[in-house]
Amino acid sequence: LAKTTQPISMDSYEGQEVNITCSHNNIATNDYITWYQQFPSQGPRFIIQGYKTKVTNEVASLFIPADRKSSTLSLPRVSLSDTAVYYCLVGFPGGYNKLIFGAGTRLAVHP
Amino acid sequence: DTEVTQTPKHLVMGMTNKKSLKCEQHMGHRAMYWYKQKAKKPPELMFVYSYEKLSINESVPSRFSPECPNSSLLNLHLHALQPEDSALYLCASSQVARGIANYGYTFGSGTRLTVV
């Protein structure tokens, strides 16, 4: 099973770009990479999903190198409201609807 | 409607009580999930329902009993819980993944359960 590794915590300041990298050495050929954001006492919220190269939406970008063994979530110009836990998830083979969360990265954005 | 609704938002129950958590979605999703989340920990998968049938039980104790009455509803029946079962219980739904894509999940806001 693919295991994900992320930094436990990160600090940033308002207006900066934040990049959170996730390692997933055992990613399977058919796996997608998905990122979620979670605020305290709320359910995780889907941010972005990708398979390879670069994906961009209105809130974030996701960069995936050719070997797909890592991925980087990029949050442009963060604000205080981006303070949250960010989870990187990789679809596990053999369990197409079995989404397993890793430890996540606690991002703190300071004024 | 693009939400998953969970009720109640907060629940306090004694160890001898029987209670139920409810989850509802009207997005046509045919996969529904229960997760348990302790403070400062990631969500842990408990159960997965696919097309109203239980497809995954992550070795959850029998004091937790899931039920999927129809494609829009998911219940979690609680009986004889322990204080260590106190946690945030999250419900989620998704399209049933086919082919190579993993579809995004939609999570509810959870039920904060306290067992006394």
Image (spheres, coloured by chain):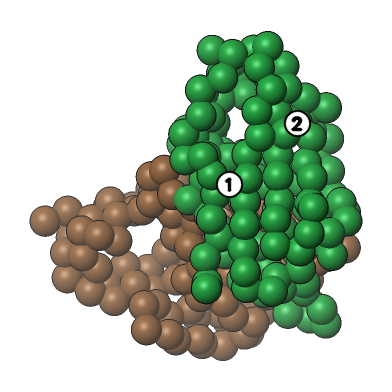
Chain colours: A brown, B green
Q: Amino acid at mark 2?
A: Phe
Residue at 56% over, 88% down: A53
Left or right relative to A10: residue B11: right
Q: Circle 2 — which element?
A: strand
- Residue B92's spot in the image, x, y percent? 62, 57
Toward which corner of the image does residue B30 lie, by quadrant? bottom right
The chain carrying label 2 is B
Residue A32 screen position, x and y as percent:
68, 75
Residue of label 1: B90
Q: Residue at x 70, y 56 (%)?
A: B73
Q: Is residue A39 above or below residue A93?
A: above
Identity of the residue drawn at 44% across and 60% down = A37
Q: Residues within 10 Å of mark 2 (few under 14, many from 20)?
A: some
Q: Is residue A84 left or right of residue B57?
A: left
Q: Is residue B95 left or right of residue A22?
A: right
Residue B18 in view (yes/no): yes
| Label 1 environment density (alpha carbons within 10 Å; few <14, some 14–19, many ≥20) | many
- Residue flagged by tag 1: what amino acid is it? Leu
Secondary structure under badge 1? strand
Q: Quadrant of residue A83?
A: bottom left
Q: CA distance from mark 1 to mark 2?
A: 14 Å
Q: Nearer the viewer, residue B34 or A16?
A: B34
Give the number of marks: 2
Identify the residue under disc 2. Answer: B64
Residue A22 shown left or right of residue A1 in the figure: left
The residue depicted at 83 percent of the width and 82 percent of the height is B99
